[in-house]
Amino acid sequence: MSEVQFDYTRQDASGASCTAHAWAKVPAPLTPAQRDDLKQRAAALLKARNAVLVAHYYVDGDLQDLALETGGCVADSLEMARFGRDHAAQTLVVAGVRFMGESAKILSPGKTVLMPDLDATCSLDLGCPPEDFAAFCDAHPDRQVVVYANTSAAVKARADWMVTSSCALAIVRHLKEQGQKILWAPDRHLGRYIQEETGADMLLWNGACIVHDEFKGVELELLKAQHPEAMVLVHPESPRSVVQLADVVGSTSQMLNAVIHGSAKEYIVATDNLIMHRMRQLAPGKVLIEAPTAGNSATCKSCAHCPWMAMNGLQGVVDCLERGVGEIHVDAATGEQAVHCITRMLDFVAAHPSALAPKVQGMVRGIGAA
Ligand code: SF4
């Protein structure tokens, strides 16, 4: 196994893509009356426009509820892609971040794809500019290019495979069995985790998620000592020191399944804290504890919530359906190239349903395959 780090340190940018801009655009809290009014208007517009709402687990709870109440879905990025592709609605409203809207458009070029705020992006996407990534690929033509879903359409157009955190391990393991060497981008923590789990020969891009990068291993150890019976659930975009303390390592869907089916009463959760909205609905009575993002080993305190996911609100759903703003466009040639790596992943997952099982470390306390 070899590892060569591609040194790419630019993680943030200015203007529409900086986190301060994102926080400034986060919708103000609604009164109950405002929330009811907007939900009713959004539901009526979804019906009138033959549209369906596809929401990520990290967006506002009201949006998650609206999606489920109107026949849409709340899911991780893999399921969002599948749902949008297979649903009969002619318009998809994607509540999440831009790469999710782009993936929906690439898979369904004939549909209209709208988003509550087109400025909602992702530090992984920002940290992997297509031109730099193309140069990285050109320098290593002997490798299969595997990219995480959290990338632009242009980066996917250059890839052989797209993966999500649900299926990344299985696909890389499959490629290794075929004797393939891999070029991986953009999340360095997820890439390192997959490399260690599979033993595959991987070159890693040096990107990170600004939310998961903040979880702290030292403080998590202290928290575990206070809750010795708690099951620790960690998303693999987290640093190694955090992943090493996990009972379950998996995607948001896999973490959700762990809470629903786990026999433990308490769960320490290391991912965006908005996932707890759905966890509380599906596993009432379970005690959910946020994994620490601060303490003696922290340089700053993070809120464990993605500023770009937070930009999604009910008003944005109403606006995009009422006024047609926030439409996602993907250049046709780019989309035609990018669709291959996404379709390849979806076909692989359909042929290998067991590929979605989460990684369960050490003792297994009542967790089945997710
Ligand atoms: S939580 Fe992290 S990976 Fe997800 S959209 Fe936000 S910055 Fe990107």
Image (cartoon, rainbow, N blue to C red):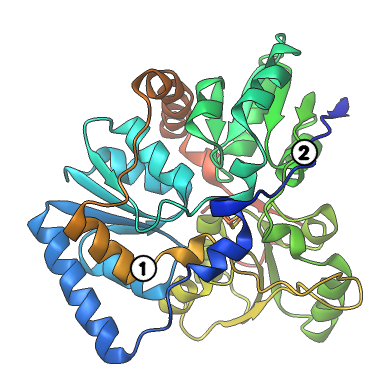
Determine which quarter of the picture holds residue 368: bottom right
Q: Does residue 131 appear to the left or right of 30 in the view shown?
A: right
Vertical arrangement, residue 337 with respect to residue 230, above or below: above
Tag nearer the camera, 1 or 2: 2
Vertical arrangement, residue 160 with respect to residue 195, above or below: above
Determine which quarter of the picture holds residue 96: bottom left
Amino acid bearing label 1: Gln
Vertical arrangement, residue 240 with respect to residue 300, above or below: above
The spot of residue 84 in percent (x, y) is 30, 44
The residue that disc 2 covers is: 206
232 and 290: which is toward the camera: 290
Amino acid bearing label 2: Asn
User: Which dot marks residue 347?
Assistant: none
The spot of residue 49 in percent (x, y) is 11, 53
369 and 143: which is toward the camera: 143
Residue under the point 17% across and 60% down: 322
Residue under the point 70% across and 15% down: 143
Q: CA distance from mark 1 to mark 2?
A: 32 Å
